[in-house]
Image (cartoon, rainbow, N blue to C red):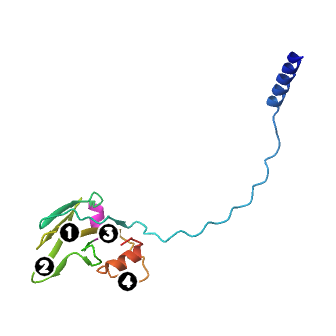
């Protein structure tokens, strides 16, 4: 009896496996709901983390994103902060006693100051050519918080 059941089960399994379902493709399902709008981003704008690893009166910051093309076609801004809510754009001059200057080259930012850079935070922002031109309102790049707001950068 067991043998007959096993043979019957094998025949049924082969019959089911060999069946092909043919017929027309069914209709397309309903379109899903549109998801919520994502947050406004900063398309193509590149910015660094805050860097406070410099000491002495000058520093070379290696920035591979500063290519020849970026330097020729983009706006590169450098800001500093005391870490307690004060922000300034470089170059920063408070004569007669204090200044921080900046120069840019392929692959680097050079910062030099009249005082020790220890404890000062620096950040760069690269705005590709055309991004500022597409903005509806003028942008005061010397106001760091306005730049952050415009390009959705976390201060």
- Identify the residue at horizontal 12%, vertical 65% (top origin): 56
Residue 4, given in percent of the width and then of the height, sits at 89, 18
Q: Nearer the viewer, residue 96 or 20?
A: 96
Disc 3 from disc 4: Cα separation: 17 Å
Residue 104, given in percent of the width and then of the height, sits at 21, 66
On whether residue 106 falls in the magenta region, the answer is no
> Is 130 left, or right, of 110 in this rendering?
right
On whether residue 73 falls in the magenta region, the answer is yes
Task: Give the mark nearer the N terminus: 3 vs 4.
Answer: 3
Choose top left, top right, bottom left or bottom right for residue 147: bottom left
Residue 106 shows in this picture? no
Question: For mark 3, what is the residue?
Answer: 125
Question: For mark 4, what is the residue?
Answer: 138
CB contact under 8 Å: marks 1 and 3:
no
Classify 103 as above or below 5: below
Question: For mark 2, what is the residue?
Answer: 98
Q: The N terminus is located in which quarter?
A: top right
Mark nearest the camera among 1 and 3 is: 1
Label 2 crowd bin: few (<14), some (14–19), many (20+), radius 10 Å: few
The dot on residue 119 is 1
Q: Which residues are magenta?
A: 68-77
Task: Give the mark nearer the N terminus: 4 vs 1.
Answer: 1
Q: Nearer the viewer, residue 103 or 15?
A: 15
Choose top left, top right, bottom left or bottom right for residue 97: bottom left
Q: Nearer the viewer, residue 1 or 52?
A: 1
Task: Give the mark nearer the N terminus: 1 vs 3.
Answer: 1
Q: The C terminus is located in which quarter?
A: bottom left
For mark 2, give the secondary structure: strand
Task: Give the mark nearer the N terminus: 1 vs 2.
Answer: 2
Disc 3 from disc 2: Cα separation: 23 Å
For mark 3, give the secondary structure: strand
């Amino acid at each position: 009896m067991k043998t007959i059941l096993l043979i019957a089960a094998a025949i049924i399994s082969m019959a089911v496996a060999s069946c092909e379902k043919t017929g027309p493709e069914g209709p397309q399902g309903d379109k899903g709901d549109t998801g919520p709008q994502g947050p406004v981003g900063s398309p193509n704008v590149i910015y660094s983390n805050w860097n406070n690893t410099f000491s002495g009166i000058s520093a070379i910051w290696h920035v591979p994103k500063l290519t020849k093309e970026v330097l020729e076609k983009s706006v590169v801004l450098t800001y500093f902060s005391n870490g307690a809510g004060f922000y300034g754009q470089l170059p920063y001059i408070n004569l007669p006693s204090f200044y921080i200057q900046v120069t840019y080259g392929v692959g680097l930012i050079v910062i030099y100051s009249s005082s020790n850079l220890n404890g000062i935070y620096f950040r760069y922002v690269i705005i590709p050519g055309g991004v500022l031109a597409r903005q509806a309102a003028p942008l005061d790049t010397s106001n760091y918080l306005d730049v952050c707001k415009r390009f959705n950068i976390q201060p």
